[in-house]
Image: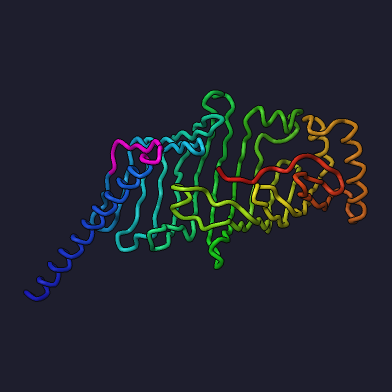
């Protein structure tokens, strides 16, 4: 019994020492990180940094957190933020966001309100802290421009997932969003006649993105990795009677221009043309020309109500089939 008691006491003392060393190490590491960001010109402040959870967890809490990167103009404010990890599995981290936070871009600020917004991260067990896989969920999400409080966009549920592939610069990304309600200006632009339901019922995406470097701590401290190739396995969206799917692959040039082809499959595509015309995205004369050309392509495919057509990105332009429809987006992460 004395021997068993001694073993228990030694084990308890050893575990307590391990937890205390880990707790002090986390506090020192995060404090040093904040100081390093401030030395680079960031705003990096928190009114309280604490590590709790003895004996089985490391719960790192940040109160009144403010981070702002002068190089990109991006900033984030939160009344609190928490990172939790089991003390015997410190590379599996759970992040928990507050119900209200503020995100600022060079253009404007957005208030983000969420219920049960959290993420599970499995991180490589080294100092680079590269995430191996990440899953973020929220039961409700609302985004409001701070200067235009009436322009509210909401989601009833959101799931985002990312997994690092065997080639460590490749990441498989997944999205599942339900109940998207657009802010009134966007709704009026896309559906000026109000003929569609208030909510976009379902949006899913499965794609693999190759970046020019691995996502790790330098993505925040130095510069964001930039996409070099995007392979779309499937994007699927439903809004009322409209149903759009997409698949394909594009390369991304060093200046962020996509080059490649995405195949679109559209059901009730004539309604989409009518919406584009009503919103002003297509002039009346051009809309009729586009509809006639797409009708010919649909008949060639054997189903006039379903359209399979390539969306081509070339030379900084987008072509829908043979028809130029506008400039290509610049795919650069700030």
Residue 312, magenta (yes or no): no
**Front one among 310 and 70:** 70
Residue 25 x/y as whole percent:
26, 54
- Left or right: 1 as drawn, with respect to 126: left
Residue 2 placement: quadrant = bottom left
Residue visible at 59% across and 27% down? 151
Image: magenta residue range: 38-49
In percent of width and height, residue 57 lies at: 29, 56
Looking at the picture, how far across and down is residue 165, in whole percent?
A: 55, 64
Q: Is residue 289 above or below residue 118?
A: above
Establish if 8 lies above or below 37. Answer: below
Reply yes or no: does residue 47 show up in magenta.
yes
x, y (%) of residue 8? 14, 69
Q: How many labels does the image show?
A: 0
Residue at 55% in and 61% down: 169
Front in this rendered view, residue 115 or 57: 57
The residue positioned 20% from the left and 63% from the top of the image is: 15
Scheme of colours in the image: rainbow
Q: In this view, does 164 lie above or below 97?
A: below
| Above or below: residue 195 compared with residue 121 | above
> In this image, 147 relative to 313: left or right?
left
Q: In which quarter of the image is the C terminus?
A: top right
Quarter of the image where one finds residue 230: bottom right
Q: Quadrant of the N terminus?
A: bottom left
Q: Is residue 68 left or right of residue 18?
A: right
């Amino acid at each position: 019994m004395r021997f068993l008691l001694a073993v228990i006491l030694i084990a308890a003392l050893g575990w307590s020492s391990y937890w205390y060393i880990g707790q002090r190490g986390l506090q020192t590491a995060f404090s040093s990180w904040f100081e390093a960001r401030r030395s680079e010109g960031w705003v990096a402040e928190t009114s309280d940094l604490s590590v709790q959870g003895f004996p089985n967890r490391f719960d790192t809490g940040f109160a009144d957190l403010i981070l702002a990167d002068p190089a990109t103009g991006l900033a984030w404010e939160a009344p609190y933020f928490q990172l939790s990890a089991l003390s015997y599995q410190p590379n599996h981290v759970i992040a928990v966001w507050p119900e209200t936070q503020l995100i600022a871009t060079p253009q404007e600020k957005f208030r983000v309100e969420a219920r049960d917004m959290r993420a599970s991260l499995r991180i490589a067990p080294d100092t680079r802290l590269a995430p191996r896989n990440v899953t973020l969920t929220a039961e409700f999400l609302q985004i409001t421009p701070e200067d235009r409080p009436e322009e509210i966009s909401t989601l009833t549920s959101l799931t985002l997932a990312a997994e690092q592939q065997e080639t460590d610069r490749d990441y498989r990304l997944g999205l599942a969003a339900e109940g998207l309600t657009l802010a009134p200006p966007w709704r009026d632009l896309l559906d000026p006649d109000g003929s569609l339901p208030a909510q976009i019922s379902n949006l899913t995406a499965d794609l693999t993105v190759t970046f020019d470097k691995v996502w790790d701590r330098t993505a925040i401290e130095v510069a964001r990795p930039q996409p070099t190739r995007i392979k779309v396995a499937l994007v699927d969206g439903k809004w009322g009677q409209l149903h759009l799917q997409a698949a394909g692959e594009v390369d991304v040039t060093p200046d962020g221009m996509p080059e490649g082809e995405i195949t679109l499959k559209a059901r009730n595509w004539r309604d989409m043309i009518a919406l584009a015309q009503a919103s002003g995205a297509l002039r009346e004369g051009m809309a009729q020309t586009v509809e006639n050309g797409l009708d010919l392509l649909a008949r060639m495919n054997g189903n006039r109500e379903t359209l399979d057509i390539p969306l081509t990105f070339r030379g900084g332009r987008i072509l829908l089939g043979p028809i130029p429809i506008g400039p290509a987006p610049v795919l650069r992460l700030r």
